[in-house]
Structure formats: C-alpha cells, structure tokens
Image (tube, helix red, strand yellow):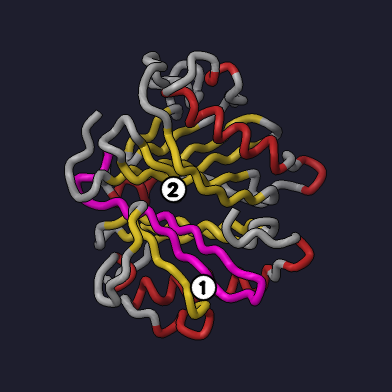
C-alpha cells in the first residue's frame, strides 16, 4: 500500500497536524497551511482522477466546515477525514498518506455535491450529529484484518452471491447512504434493508484503505463500476465484531448518478 510504514515509524502527531492543516486548507480554499507538510512530489486526487492544476478542485474552494472527524492508520501511516459543509454544499471524504520523512505524499478526496447519489448535505449533517464514534476500549478492539474483511465483504455483495454471508451484520446498525438513513426505525434495526439481490454486477475496484483499530473503522475508496464508474467512499465501523455504522459518498463525475 502506498505510504505504508512500520507502525513504530509512523508519527501520530505528524498525522494529526497534517489532518488539521488539511482542514484549515479546505476552510480557506488555499494550500498555505499545508505547504510545509507536503512532499516535493505529492499528488492530489479528486473523485479518482489526478488533479494537476493549481487552481482547480474542491480543495481550492473555501468551505465552512460544520462537521469533521479524522481517523488514524498507524500501519499505513495515513488518515481519513470526513467533512460536511451544509452551505457548500459538500460532503467530503479524504485519505491522506505520508512517506518515510513524515511528509504528505498524497491527498485523495471523494467530493460529493449536488447531483451526487442521494446527496443532501443538510440532512447528512443532521444524521452524523446523532451518532457516537467514541474510541473503542483496547480490550474490545477488533483486529485490523477483521475490520478490513468486513468492509471488503460488504463491497463484494454486488458481484458475489456469498459475500453477504461474510458481512458481520450487527443490531443496531445504521447506514448513511448519501443523505438517506437506513436501519434506524427498521423492523430489525440493521443495515440489511436494501442490500443487493443482483450479484452479477460489475465489481467495486481500485480499493484504497485507511484502517483505525481504535475506532473500529475502515475507509475504503473505490471505483463503483456498476454505477457509471462512480468515485465512491464507503466507511464502516465495527463494535464488538459487528457492523454498527456505514457511511457512503458516491459521485458520478458531475452527472446525476444512475444505477
């Protein structure tokens, strides 16, 4: 994985400071707060495409940030930050990776906005504020491989008829899909309603991971091939080995997303 370092070589303070600098940059619409933390050959990717212009991309748009949460991966030396700007309107997911010198080598953003799948930033903000993403006590944390396997199994359901059996379904569980909240109030209070029944669809490919055992979470960016090759972010949180939260963002290149 790009930017992987031995856990002992990854500096959580550097990760946290870079994530804060990224949020400041997004708030200002300027790279100034990030400049000292960027590697000389750093890359910026937005919705699965490399952005080379210094004046384009959502990172150059000043946004009022109403919600921010950052998760830390000390194995991959990376962070995942979820941002909501109701006035933007944008909901952003950003994976930031660091090199051996602690510098940022890549900023990878899924930027959802008007016309994105089930998009409504105001509703998304309302729902995320209802959730509790407290750190999981050390004795109750799931292993890194277990967390990733849960996310992979979920994303495999579109192309595999057996993947749903491998998802560690939990109760309660809620899915925030764009701005649609599934699970809360359903008969079994789970994330199962609406899972795919057609397992012969194109797979979800080019997956990139940020895994935080303390939060029980994995952020997975991918190409959602069966939905117009959309840029997609799925984040999963496990509690006690069971799925508790699913957050998704799906952007179809400025076009209205269609199945």
- Residue highlighted by disc 1: 20
Where is residue 120 drawn, in percent x and y? Answer: 26, 46
Q: Nearer the viewer, mark 2 or mark 1?
A: 1
Question: Could you say whether the residue bearing mark 1 is in a helix, strand or loop?
Answer: helix
Q: For mark 2, what is the residue? A: 128
Whether 91 is drawn above or below 217: the answer is below
Q: CA distance from mark 2 to mark 1?
A: 20 Å
Q: From this viewpoint, which residue is outermost toward the right?
A: 139
Numbered range of the magenta stretch: 93-118
| Dot 2 or dot 1, earlier in sequence | 1
Q: Is residue 5 above or below residue 251?
A: below
Q: Which residue corresponds to the image point at 52% horizontal and 69% vertical from the top-left?
A: 105
Name the secondary structure under disc 2. Answer: helix
Residue 134 within the magenta-colored segment of the rendering: no
Residue 28 location, quadrant: bottom left
Question: Taking 242 as reference, is 212 above or below it?
Answer: below
Badge 2 crowding class, 10 Å Cα cut-off, few under 14, some 14 to 19, many 20 or more, is: some
Q: Quadrant of the C terminus?
A: top left
Dot 1: few (<14), some (14–19), or many (≥20) neighbours within 10 Å? some
The answer to which of 33 and 7 lies nearer the viewer is 7
Whole-percent x, y for residue 25 in the image: 40, 76
Rendered view: 223 above or below 186: below
In the image, farthest residue toward the front: 41
Q: Position of residue 225 (x, y in %)?
A: 34, 34
Residue drawn 29% across and 46% down? 251
Q: Is residue 101 magenta?
A: yes
- Quadrant of the rendered structure where residue 98 is? bottom right
- Residue 16 image offset from top left, x and y in percent: 60, 70
Picture mark count: 2
């Amino acid at each position: 994985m790009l930017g992987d370092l031995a856990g002992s070589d990854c500096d959580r303070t550097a990760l946290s400071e870079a994530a804060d600098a990224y949020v400041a940059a997004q708030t200002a619409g300027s790279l100034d707060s990030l400049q000292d933390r960027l590697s000389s050959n750093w890359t910026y990717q937005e919705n699965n495409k490399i952005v080379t212009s210094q004046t384009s991309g959502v990172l150059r748009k000043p946004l009022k940030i109403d919600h921010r949460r950052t998760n830390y991966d000390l194995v991959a030396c990376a962070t995942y930050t979820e941002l909501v700007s109701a006035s933007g309107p944008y909901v952003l997911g950003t994976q930031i990776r660091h090199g051996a010198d602690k510098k940022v080598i890549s900023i990878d953003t899924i930027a959802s906005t008007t016309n994105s799948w089930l998009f409504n930033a105001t509703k998304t903000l309302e729902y995320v504020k209802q959730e509790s993403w407290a750190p999981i006590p050390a004795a109750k944390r799931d292993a890194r491989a277990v967390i990733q396997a849960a996310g992979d199994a979920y994303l495999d359901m579109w192309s595999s008829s057996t993947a749903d059996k491998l998802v560690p379904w939990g109760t309660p569980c809620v899915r925030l899909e764009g701005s649609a909240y599934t699970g809360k109030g359903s008969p079994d209070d789970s994330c199962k309603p609406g899972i795919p029944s057609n397992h012969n669809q194109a797979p979800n490919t080019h997956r990139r991971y940020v895994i935080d055992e303390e939060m029980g979470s994995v952020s997975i960016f991918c190409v959602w091939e069966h939905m117009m090759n959309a840029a997609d972010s799925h984040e999963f949180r496990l509690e006690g080995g069971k799925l508790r939260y699913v957050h998704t963002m799906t952007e179809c290149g400025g076009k209205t997303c269609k199945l």
